[in-house]
Every structure is written in structure tokens, then in C-alpha cells.
Amino acid sequence: MKKTALALIIGALAVATSANATNWYVQGDLGYSKNKFTSYPEIDKSKFEPRLSVGYDFGDFRLAVDYTHYGKFSGTDGYGDYTSSKIYGIGFSGIYDFEINSDIKPYVGVRLASNVFKTDNSSGGFFESKTQTKFGYGALVGAQYKLDANWAVNGGIEYNRLGSFEDTKVNNYGAKVGIRYNF
């Protein structure tokens, strides 16, 4: 997790210092999200959720790679089984910016992700620890405000399906605010 975030930061710095750095950007977001586990209703928790992105701006369309830390969750199901999970993901987003001749520019986007679940389960005296990678997808909508030629702030809402297991679907609903620097 920390190695991935460090790799994204180093990559962003390498892009920024290269001669062809125009149109590249880095963005940091902080959100408040609700994660819902269908088979474990008491695990449904709201948490702060950081995201770091590196992307390329084509004008009205942006592509970005991101690292998102969804948090740690724990609880029991109706049968007394206990589970705890730590979830993070590497995502790829496509975002379309609408030009409306205003300082505020709305956007919509889609996101695909590889989400890692580090899970510990305790059931009937047995303990199991495992790491699983699940395919995720999502949608986002929001608006950005350009502060100057390089800086912009944004706010938006999003939905992400983080993954599915045998009897559990993990969904994420949230709102994020962020700041972006275009090189």
C-alpha cells in the first residue's frame, strides 16, 4: 500500500521534471464514504478515504491512474462469524469535462479498479487469513473550479463496486473534495 503510493508520487515527480510535462497532472482527494457489505450489515461504516491520482489532460477528456485507501472494517454476521478487512485499490479513470463557458466546469467519469481485500475470518473456532484481489467498477460526477493556470479544486460524488464474494457484495458510496496541479 505505502509502496504503491510512493511509486505514484515518484512517477508524478518524474513526469513533472521531464521536458514533455505539459498536460500531465497530479491530484489529491479526500472523501467521506460509506462502505456497505451485503452479508455483514453491522460492518457498514462511514470513513474518510484518501486518493492520490496521476493523469493526463487531453482538454475536455482526462485519463488517470489512482491509489485509493478504503480503510479497515470489522464485524459479525448473523451466525456469530467475525471478519475484518483492510481494503485498498489501484484504479483507472476516464473523465469527461463539460465546457459551459464558466469558471465552474462539471464532469462525469467511469472508474475501473483492482481492489485488494486483506481479510481475517473467525468461524466456529477456526481462523483464516487471506488476501484477495477483486475487479471493481464505478461512476463519478462533480465539478471543478480552476484557480489559475495550474491549480484547480474539485468536488464530486461517486459509486464504486469494490468486489463480490460468494454471498457478499461490497459497495462504496461517497463524496470527495480535492486539489489538482497541472504541469
Image: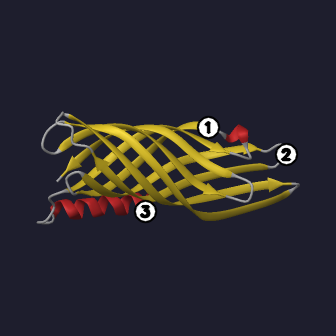
Distance from Cα at disc 3 to Cα at disc 2: 35 Å
Q: Secondary structure at mark 2?
A: loop
Q: Quadrant of the C terminus?
A: bottom left
Depth order, front residue of 36/103: 103
Q: Earlier in the sequence, mark 3 or mark 2?
A: 3
| Residue that carries the numbered disc 3 in the rendered image | 3
Q: Residues within 10 Å of mark 1 (few under 14, many from 20)?
A: some
User: Is residue 160 shown above or below 129?
Assistant: above
Give the image quarter of residue 115.
bottom right
Q: Secondary structure at mark 3?
A: helix
Residue 116 seen anywhere in this rendered image of the structure: yes
Depth order, front residue of 82/141: 141
**Is 104 on the left-hand or right-hand side of 108?**
left
Q: Secondary structure at mark 1?
A: strand
Q: Amino acid at mark 3?
A: Lys
Specify the farthest residue to the front.
Answer: 100
- Residue 123: % across, % down: 83, 54
Specify the farthest residue to the right.
Answer: 124
Marks 1/2 in contact by CB < 8 Å: the verdict is no
- Total numbered labels: 3
- Residue 46: % across, % down: 57, 36
- Residue at the (39%, 38%) spot, across then down: 156
**Is 44 on the left-hand or right-hand side of 149?**
right
| Residue that carries the numbered disc 2 in the rendered image | 80
| Residue that carries the numbered disc 1 in the rendered image | 45
**Is 166 on the left-hand or right-hand side of 10?**
right
Q: Amino acid at mark 2?
A: Gly
Q: Amino acid at mark 1?
A: Lys
Q: Earlier in the sequence, mark 1 or mark 2?
A: 1
